[in-house]
Image (spheres, rainbow, N blue to C red):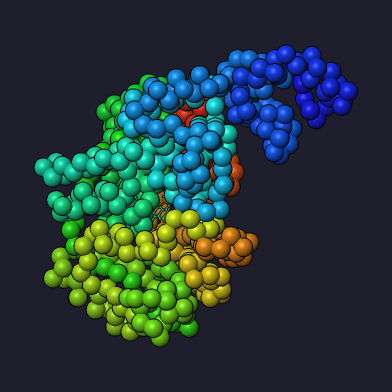
Amino acid sequence: MSAFDPKRTSPSGIVALLVGRMRRWSSCPLSGQCCCPMQRPKAKSWAGCYPVRGQAECAIFGYEENMLNETTIATFKSSLRGELIKQSDTRYDTARKVYNGMIDRRPLLIANCADVADVITAVKFGREHKLVVSIRGGGHNAAGLSVCDDGLVIDLGRINYVHADPKNRTVLAGGGALWGDVDHAAHAFGLAVPAGIISTTGVGGLTLGGGIGHLTRQCGLTVDNLLSVDMVLADGRFVTASAKENPDLFWAVRGGGGNFGVVTAFLFKAHPIHTSYAGPMLWSMEDAAEILRWYRDFIGKAPNALNGFFAFLTVPPGAPFPTHLHNKKMCGVVWCYTGPLKNAERVFAPIRKFKAPALDLVGPIPHPALQSLFDPIFPPGLQWYWKADFVRDLSDEAIPLHVKHGALLPTMQSTMHLYPIDGKASMIKKTATPWCYRDAKWAAVMVGVDPDPANKEKISNWAKDYWTALHPYSAGGAYINFMMEEGDERIRATYGKNYDRLAKVKKRYDPTNFFHVNQNIKPAK
Ligand SMILES: Cc1cc2nc3c(=O)[nH]c(=O)nc-3n(C[C@H](O)[C@H](O)[C@H](O)COP(=O)(O)OP(=O)(O)OC[C@H]3O[C@@H](n4cnc5c(N)ncnc54)[C@H](O)[C@@H]3O)c2cc1C
């Protein structure tokens, strides 16, 4: 570290230092890639120059180790099968964008890895040059945890192969595959893997955080269906983790996020699900309290073959929704029944009898169609702000608060979902994976969404107010994949008694916390 600190050094001291180091400055090895105001007159401040965020420091301030000069970058680039994108490349602005339009980070380099060899090279390069490193799967994380400022993004988007094996009922997916890729490949064999409800979400982030969706009650969380992973660790080693190989690592990745390494392949158990009886059923907002009470009592007793998440939403102004409902705030349940189709009408009879829905779009639907039903409502680039909690009991006191805040949905795409996490997901022991809220009944998420950045405050404030009102009725922690950057305490609350074990595994596989752009688990001391 240079002795110079712009916050502490006097102006005359700065001049002396500059003069003293003029010779080195004139041959600055960073060649204008740093944010030195001398090199780039439009740079925002001196503060951004010192240090150059842990990568390579400007020659003015001495310190010539780990320099990221053009030659170093060119050597790195030539050792990749994939692409290396720099700030000066035309593709840069597209490549650094993530799903949440609120996130605006500027990495130094984006390594668009084509294979495992590229990932190993990128991890070693990041280590050698002391770069902040983030891992990008599908880029869906609302907190933008796949992209970093001034560091290296290891982008797995090109490693998106999927192989379905009908004989063994398994699906192998590359670390950068999207769920739509998996649904497509598995469906051809009448198979499905439990995932989330939007097909453009990455397999990587969703799986490593847990994975909740239409099949949670039937088949458990996504991690409950994970059989093994291939990974590149922080020291560049390639390992497989499964129940038999590196079982401690396998335990940790089933909920512990991207803390332990770059997962280059996921092997899942698949289920014989081809066409389910599924879709949304909507009721008037005036009936919301009654529907919520009924839903609470009904879903807990429903067979595991029936999943249904509750939602407050605004009806989109377009097909297939009838015009008289366009832009109306409503409540509803999105059902998914995977039992025999011949039994479906019988299973749904009591639901339809309880209160005739204002809109009933439930019927037979192929699994990939269900998985992508909501994709058009949520294209990439919208502004997103989330708050979440686990819920054990939807009490009579909490219901009026839900109805109050649900009726205040600030924009057309904003929503609140209560995802059931009981059924098969609750049959796994609390310590079997890091996901310790096996006794909670729902994962609640308040999601403010809008295309217009001017509405950022509006959607965030609504989500925060809603969450603040309901948090006292929650179980404590929250699903990490529904959290923004909320700090260590919330992460600890989420993993509960499993946190210390995660910290020990972290210490074993990533003792320097190299992979820290995530819901971070600190290595045990
Ligand atoms: C519209 C939308 C709908 C969603 N619906 C659901 C849902 O139904 N169910 C649900 O469970 N979640 C859902 N989520 C949340 C989702 O699970 C998280 O946003 C998740 O992080 C997305 O994964 P990703 O790979 O796309 O994310 P990224 O932004 O690419 O990565 C997220 C985190 O995971 C790490 N990571 C990603 N891939 C890898 C890898 N291969 N190896 C190591 N680390 C990796 C990253 O480093 C980062 O820390 C939804 C999110 C959005 C935006």
Q: Nearer the viewer, residue 393 or 4?
A: 4
Q: Nearer the viewer, residue 470 or 270?
A: 270
**Residue 203 quadrant:** top left
Q: Where's residue 357, x and y in %? A: 34, 81
Residue 442 visible, this angle: no
Q: Where's residue 160, x and y in %? A: 30, 41
Is 141 drawn above or below residue 512 in the view shown? below
Question: In the figure, is residue 343 to the left or right of 459?
Answer: left
What is the count of numbered marks?
Answer: 0
Q: Residue at x 56, y 63 (%)?
A: 452
Q: Nearer the viewer, residue 56 or 186?
A: 56
Q: Residue at x 19, y 75 (%)?
A: 346
Is 140 drawn above or below residue 292 in the view shown? above
**Residue 51 quadrant:** top right
Question: In the figure, is residue 8 to the left or right of 215?
Answer: right
Q: Where's residue 250, x and y in %? A: 34, 33
**Residue 280 quadrant:** bottom left
Q: Quadrant of the N terminus?
A: top right
Q: Where's residue 211, x and y in %? A: 37, 49
Is 397 drawn above or below residue 189 in the view shown? below
Q: Quadrant of the C terminus?
A: top right
Q: Residue at x 62, y 28 (%)?
A: 32
